[in-house]
Image: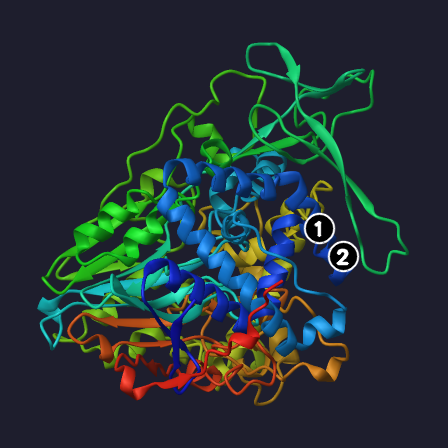
Amino acid sequence: MTFDLYRDAHGIPHLRAGDVLALARAQGRVTARDRAWQLEVERHRVRGTTAAFLGREALPWDRFARRARLEDTARRCHAALEERDPETAAWVRAYVEGVNEGLAAGARRAPEFARTGLAPGRWEPWTPFGVWLGTHILFAGFPAKLWREEVVRHLGPEAVGLFAADGPGTAGSNGWLVTGARTATGQAVIAGDPHRFIEEPGVYQQIRLACPEFDVLGLAVPGVPGIAHFAHTGTVAWAITNAMADYQDLYRERLRRTPDGVEALDPDGTWRPAPAHTESIEVAGAEGRPEEVEVIETARGPVVIGSPPPHGTTPAAGPEADPCAPLALRHPPRVTGDLGFGALLPLLRARRVADVDRAFDRWAEPVNVVLAADTEGGTLHRVAGRVPVRAAANRVRPVPAWEPGHEWTGWHETPYGDLDDGLAVMANQRGPAAPLGTEFAPPHRADRIRALLGGRPRWRAADMPEVHTDTHLASAAPLLDHLAALDGLAPAPAALRERLLRWDRRMAADSADAAAYAAVRGALVRRLAAEPAFAVLADPPAYPEVFQPWLALLPRVGLALEHLLTAPDLYGIDRPALVRAALEETAVTLGEGATWGDTHRLAPWRALPPEAPGEAPQEPGLSGDHDCVLSTSSVPGLTDLAARASAARYVWDLARREDSRWVVPFGACGVPGDPHHRDQLPLWLTGGLAPVVTDWTLLTEEDVDHEDVDHE
């Protein structure tokens, strides 16, 4: 295999090969060299074997991966693609061959392999399907249905709306399209940033892929070929955000054990076999004692929660009798054998908006809102993905599998959106995807982006960081309104209140007022969560640990604080008294000169924690907050640390691709100590963007050493 590898000043790989298959192989090989440890972790996550080298803390994910049958679904999707689209299947296979060729060299560079004693395993043709599935299986937040079930059980169905907010386990994004009528060049600009849990190495990989058929740059998912979410081909560019659609269902199952195995009660009243088997999970440090997990699948899907009662026991009839009754997950890839990989090559080959539109007709998972523009003035604003047609109840809570009326009966047509005054803005709010979802993000980010874009008649690509980094917090209004209504305060809380009422509502890292607001907010959230009306939600049923983030009361109260403060009545809770108490507490406990960035610090996830507490780098303080355009999510009432933020920022300029810009939180390389491991962090922190270099003569060619190839 021959290919050319160039890198820019930030170590971002630019690949050039003679054909599509050679290019895919090169992408796999270079990704393995730069991200070997990350790829190895992802491979194990698909198979549910991470506890074998990460220890007992990784068991919750491994149990879920086994029970949800991620590996088997990936195999199914790969087999179906081979039959349906052999060209794309061969392209994926070429990528996998490249990964296997580059892993040995990548592992020699990555210290994590030596530390764990792990040798890189061989990738299979279906492994990229598993990486995509594992990345997105919890993306749509189906565990939120468990939370709503608890809310209904304890507070009644009318309380569900009180907590309707962008849940703690979901991912969001900002994205906006400014047409040529609103730019200085007369050509469109697309910009935005995906919000994900921040991982090191990062979840996105800056890369350029060039061959005689296309020359595309953008943000790839390590372990998956091509560039799916954010890309610029030179004549057309596109970006996505989470559509917040609901396309995964939970079915409460009635299961029983018989001498022949497990049976499930179907809607026609018939007990039918539910295939079941037991798998073992190796656990590092467990002295050779593996964990066993029972894997069961009904006609609805894999059982991800609960198990059948012992033989001879009558199954519980509903959640009132047994809140932890077995639950099966039904989601499109398991039903159809399609993850949407058929869209990936057509996207790389796209030249115009119409090509992007046709490619996204083949998109499946996850469901996204797409923006695209081309150099001929074409624009696109649409939803892409597969959402089943079924009863409204399926979208809200787990539904009884044994009752008719909860079947899937087809697929929704994906809606299209419009541009307004030369703009399209997407920030997970209700928009074109509204008919397909249940909960959406509050409108604050979208409204703020639109207001900022309306503030000047003409925009340039270089101006877009002004929008990316805006820290105005519109969601502070309800709490500040409550503070304004207080009277009879002692001097210290009165002074703090006046200070907050003068605050500019910007969550800047160096702002003491932002820190004071966050402290009052956190104290109020803790008090609300302790109220007897809500305290009943503090101890949810013993669902598997992987679902607990969706069921934790404090984050739910913090994210729903606006609703809780503005509802006409809140179960008789004296909200002014709680606000007063939170203010008084903060007036005593707030540190002198404390700023928001002192406590609102980046908290990235690493598969392998540092061996000693002092080994991890001191992560920086951050501006922004959950509802700011600069979305750096804390968990009010629990922690100011930010585990979720912009996983990348991009600006695609359709006038001159070389005027485009991008940045990731850390760097292009996943190897600790490499010069490009964290070299983009200073840019990311300040809102800066690295240049997109398109001139090959301005790049540095890197020798493709064939001795690095694993020929085993």
Towards the viewer: 632 or 648: 648
Residue found 40% across the figure and 32% down from its top: 388
Alpha carbons under labels 2 and 1: distance apart: 13 Å
Residue 447 image position (x, y, % from top left): 29, 62
Towards the viewer: 537 or 572: 537
Few, some or many residues within 10 Å of mark 2 (<14, 14–19, 20+)? many
Residue 337 visible to the viewer: yes
Residue tagged 2? 52
Residue 451 image position (x, y, % from top left): 24, 67
Extreme residue in the top direction = 269
Q: Is residue 338 above or below residue 266?
A: below
Q: Is residue 421 above or below residue 74?
A: below
Q: Is residue 509 above or below residue 370?
A: below
Give amino acid for label 1: Pro
Residue 275 image position (x, y, % from top left): 67, 25
Quick one: quadrant of the N terminus? bottom left
Towards the viewer: 70 or 145: 70
Residue found 62% across the figure and 10% down from its top: 270
The residue mark sitting in front, 2 or 1, is: 2
Image side of residue 201 versus residue 698, left or right: right
Extreme residue in the bottom direction = 593
Q: Quadrant of residue 529?
A: bottom right
Give amino acid for label 2: Ala
Residue 133 image position (x, y, % from top left): 52, 48
Residue 485 visible to the viewer: no
Image side of residue 575 versus residue 272, left or right: left
Few, some or many residues within 10 Å of mark 1 (<14, 14–19, 20+)? some
**Residue 60: assigned label:** 1
* Helix, strand or loop at mark 1: helix
**Disc count in the image?**
2
**Residue 233: assigned label:** none
